[in-house]
């Protein structure tokens, strides 16, 4: 049997999937998203203004929202850069996409060659684009720093785009959370940093063979 790389091998037979730094950054991004979602919802419509009480006051919430947005973007891209290599598209991903619905309905098993499947890669790249657009549109409407220098029509367009992009992100995050819950064992990877060999072999066979050795049982 091939020797397992020490960086991925665990004494109890589990495989390391995420480092402590990656997990902390991931949960930091998750916390930032929750703050942004609740404060953004309150700013979006009076019906949701009750959420401002969670921040102490509406004034404090208005101040926090953009600053948390900057921290969120920095954390996200710091994390995303580490994952970029594993999220490059390859021919097997196109094949996976052809049978994605059959896979989700458990009608077909699909071999995943890398650390992430095609669905996860689409989620990754869509969030890279959406968060960049949210950051840019947010700067254009950020009072009192940038908004006063931006033409009114541009600010209005940026406000609409910011709200629409926030909704797209909400849907994407919802899918991400559901998929993590639906795929039994996935939450363990982001809480403990490890996965069982059976989980890795079943969901990400190519990655399993790479980290555990091609002759691994």
Image: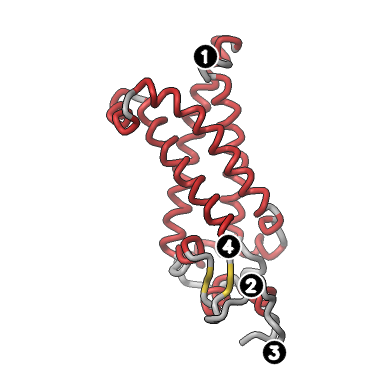
Element on which disc 2 rests: loop
**Which residue is identified by label 2?**
8
- Crowding at mark 2 (Cα within 10 Å: few <14, some 14-19, many 20+): some
Badge 1 or badge 2: first in the primary sequence: 2
Q: Is residue 149 above or below residue 79?
A: above
Residue 53 in the image: x percent, y percent?
29, 29
Judging depth in this view, the residue of 171 and 10 nearest the camera is 10
**Which residue is identified by label 1?**
144
Mark 4–mark 3 distance (CA, rounded to whole Å): 24 Å
Mark 2–mark 4 distance (CA, rounded to whole Å): 10 Å
In this rendering, would 165 be left or right of 44? right
- Crowding at mark 4 (Cα within 10 Å: few <14, some 14-19, many 20+): some
Residue 156 in the image: x percent, y percent?
51, 16
Mark 1–mark 3 distance (CA, rounded to whole Å): 63 Å
Element on which disc 1 rests: loop
Badge 2 or badge 4: first in the primary sequence: 2
Label ID, residue 1: 3
């Amino acid at each position: 049997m091939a020797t397992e790389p020490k960086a991925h091998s665990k004494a109890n037979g589990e495989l390391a999937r995420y480092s402590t730094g990656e997990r902390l950054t991931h949960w930091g991004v998750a916390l930032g998203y929750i703050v942004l979602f609740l404060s953004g919802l309150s700013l979006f419509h009076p019906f949701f203004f009750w959420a401002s009480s969670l921040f102490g006051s509406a004034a404090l919430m208005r101040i926090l929202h953009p600053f948390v947005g900057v921290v969120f973007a920095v954390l996200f891209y710091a994390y995303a850069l580490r994952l970029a290599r594993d999220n490059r598209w390859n021919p097997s991903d196109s094949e996976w996409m052809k049978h994605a619905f059959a896979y989700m309905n458990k009608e077909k098993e699909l071999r995943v060659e890398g650390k992430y499947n095609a669905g996860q890669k689409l989620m990754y790249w869509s969030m890279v684009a959406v968060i960049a657009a949210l950051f840019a549109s947010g700067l254009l409407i950020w009072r009192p720093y940038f908004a006063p220098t931006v033409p009114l029509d541009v600010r209005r367009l940026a406000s609409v785009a910011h709200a629409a992009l926030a909704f797209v992100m909400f849907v994407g995050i919802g899918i991400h959370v559901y998929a993590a819950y639906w795929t039994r064992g996935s939450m363990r990877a982001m809480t403990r940093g490890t996965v069982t060999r059976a989980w890795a072999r079943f969901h990400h066979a190519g990655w399993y063979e790479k980290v555990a050795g091609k002759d691994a049982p």
